[in-house]
Image (tube, coloured by chain):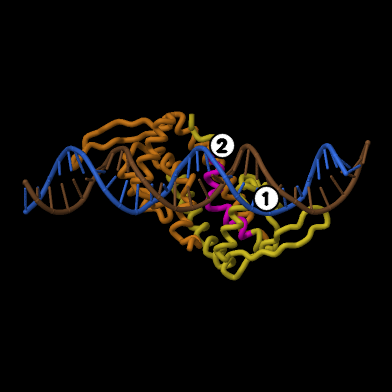
Chain colours: A yellow, B orange, C blue, D brown
Amino acid sequence: MSVTTDAQLLAQLRRGVIEHCVLALLDRGPRYGFDLVRALAAVEGLGTSEGTIYPLLSRLRKDGLLETSWQPSDQGPPRRYYELTAQGRTALDVFHRHWRSFRAAVDEVLEGDK
Amino acid sequence: MSVTTDAQLLAQLRRGVIEHCVLALLDRGPRYGFDLVRALAAVEGLGTSEGTIYPLLSRLRKDGLLETSWQPSDQGPPRRYYELTAQGRTALDVFHRHWRSFRAAVDEVLEGDK
DNA sequence: GACTGCTACCTTGCTATGCAAGGTACCTTG
DNA sequence: CAAGGTACCTTGCATAGCAAGGTAGCAGTC
């Protein structure tokens, strides 16, 4: 048992990145939760589920990184749109820097001396 | 409260990567736990503690990715050296591929349309 | 109107795992 | 023998992804 599967491996990688991928997506314009799930699913390795996204969006809102507004839909129930606050944009910038240096660190260890 | 701190941000990033960084380090030769902690601490962003490493090494050993042997030290208590098994090397290769594609996915989302 | 299916929201409970803190023990130096 | 560094390991907590389940609006079909 255990012996990390591919799925688990990716799940672990997503951790701590998804949050900021959501911010990055919202940096391009407002979006609603269900749509974010689809957008992430379209990117290999970032696919996730509603059980991940909704609690995440709640948290980001509570932390003041996102604002929301309900809007009716042409076809279906109303949607809750999320958009970045100034604080959210700052957090995204901070992450951006961290990501670059982190990525380099991992590359360094992985490629090492090969 | 909450509002992810830099430390927490990095901790989340490390998740799912540390495990394979350890494998990568051991791919260059056997090493003991305490030394791995120091080696990781030397890489910006990958610094972690014994409370992380020892349970991790145990798990990897249980999963058959590592083998261990006790060896006396010149100065101090005996050391438990870890080295990769064939299975461990395979796991490292698998991760390597995942990492590259994951890294590209995140870059794509982050850089997006800027 | 009732049924089906899609869209869209959200919550509960489980699990994995990083880490601070604490504990044990070996060895050397004074 | 006391102190300090090295080295091992465990306990308990907090976080966060996710499967599964729940609610409800809307559209099309019979």
| Most common SS among magenta residues | helix
Residue B107 x, y percent position in the rendering = 60, 54
**Which amino acid is tagged 1?**
Val
Please tell me whether residue A85 is drawn above or below residue A46 in the rendered image.
below
Please tell me whether residue A38 is drawn above or below residue C4 in the rendered image.
below
Q: Earlier in the sequence, mark 1 or mark 2?
A: 2
At horizontal 23% and vertical 36% (from top left) the residue drawn is B78
Q: Is residue A86 left or right of residue B72?
A: right
At horizontal 52% and vertical 44% (from top left) the residue drawn is A12
**Which amino acid is tagged 2?**
Asp
Q: CA distance from mark 1 to mark 2?
A: 20 Å
Residue A77 x, y percent position in the rendering = 77, 54
Which residue in the structure is indicated by mark 2? A6
Element type at mark 1: helix
Q: Which residues are magenta?
A: A6-24
Mark 1 falls within which chain? A
User: Dot 2: few (<14), some (14–19), or many (≥20) neighbours within 10 Å?
Assistant: few
Which residue in the structure is indicated by mark 1? A37
Residue A111 seen in render: no
Residue A72 x, y percent position in the rendering = 78, 60
Q: Quarter-wise, where is residue B7 in the image? A: bottom left
Mark 2 falls within which chain? A
Please tell me whether residue C26 is drawn above or below residue A90 in the rendered image.
above
